[in-house]
Image: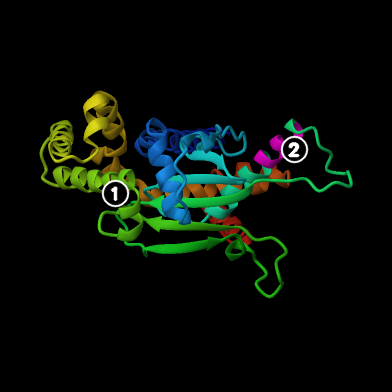
Amino acid sequence: MQDTKRFFFKLYKWVGRKRVRREIKDRLFRFLFEKDKEALLQLYNALNGTEYHDVGMLQAFTIESAVYAAMKNDLAFVITGTMNLYEHQSTYNPNMPVRFLIYLAEEYQKLIEQAETSLYGTKRISLPTPQCVVFYNGEKEMPEEQVLRLSDAFENKKQRADVELTVHMYNINYGHNQELLKKCRMLREYAEFVDTVRAYLAEGIERQQALNEAIDYCIEHGILSEILRKYKAEVLGMLLEEFDVDKYERTLKNEGREEGEERLSQLTIMLLRQNRIDDVERMASDAAYRKRLFREFDL
């Protein structure tokens, strides 16, 4: 019984760590484009080959998905009948199509309820066309652009799928996708800023000093200078979270252990769904039996 309690306590801590990481993720990217709507419109134009100039066309909305709360860190807006969902990531995630699908289903449901339209009526319901985009700037090498498809996750590859969702992922590290970055000044300067911050952190000096010097350098050289002058304290606070080198090193050391904990949590959820409570308790103290269950569920 004591082993079972320790197991669930470890599982609870693992879920808590994941939640905290999501909440502090990539806030600077969103901060920049929320402060400058003209830059957001320029980003949309750069992606779509349009030339809109009226920021009043942007209809921003807040992502408040109960199923996927992490989406609150993204940019979401409607323009000319298109629902645009932009997410910035420093870690590659192949599950983005599934995550966007969950959000879109909830958002469409809200729109239908607000319009007081019946799904069972004879009139076709008009919905904004979705555009799902990920901006990647992690340190792992990735292609300039790639398309992630929902169908890649489907088990039966021989069966034609009746549902598809695509996500366009752009590598926005400095030196990549230069044509795209050239069309959006904020995106280009953000890429330069991140590259500068990483260079200062790599020098090995104290973290906060390195970040301060990187910010001062960018202000002096016209990289996000207007926003950095006005919001230097806020940006520094974000960087101390997003570029926490000590946390990053601890994450690398714990990566193998956390991967095992993730498998354990998935196994627990599967067993609970099947009401196999005895198996949950037994695997907490029986390593051999736990391995058998991993094989049974192909984890």
User: Is 45 one of the magenta-colored residues?
Assistant: no
Q: 279 or 69, which lies in front?
A: 69
**Residue type, mark 1 in image:** Arg
Q: Quadrant of residue 235?
A: top left
Q: Is residue 178 above or below residue 124?
A: below
Quadrant in which the N terminus appears? top right
Q: Is residue 42 left or right of residue 98?
A: left
The picture places residue 161, in percent across and down from the top left corner, at: 70, 66
State the extent of the magenta-drawn residues as a range.
107-113
Q: Residue at x 45, y 37 (%)?
A: 22
Circle 2: element type: helix
Q: Main secondary structure of the magenta part?
A: helix
Determine crowd level at label 2: few under 14, some 14-19, many 20+ residues with C-alpha closer than 10 A. some
Q: Is residue 93 left or right of residue 4?
A: left
| Residue at the disc numbered 2 | 112
Circle 1: element type: helix
Q: Residue at x 14, y 41 (%)?
A: 221
| Residue at the disc numbered 1 | 188
Q: Residue at x 53, y 37 (%)?
A: 57
The picture places residue 37, in percent across and down from the top left corner, at: 42, 35
User: Is 108 one of the magenta-colored residues?
Assistant: yes
Q: Is residue 80 above or below residue 141?
A: above
Is residue 109 among the parts visible in the rendering? yes
- Which of pointers 1 and 2 lies earlier in the amino acid sequence? 2
The picture places residue 282, in percent across and down from the top left corner, at: 61, 45
Q: Residue at x 68, y 75 (%)?
A: 158
Q: 158 or 144, which lies in front?
A: 144
The picture places residue 205, in percent across and down from the top left corner, at: 10, 38
Is residue 58 among the parts visible in the rendering? no
**Residue type, mark 2 in image:** Ile
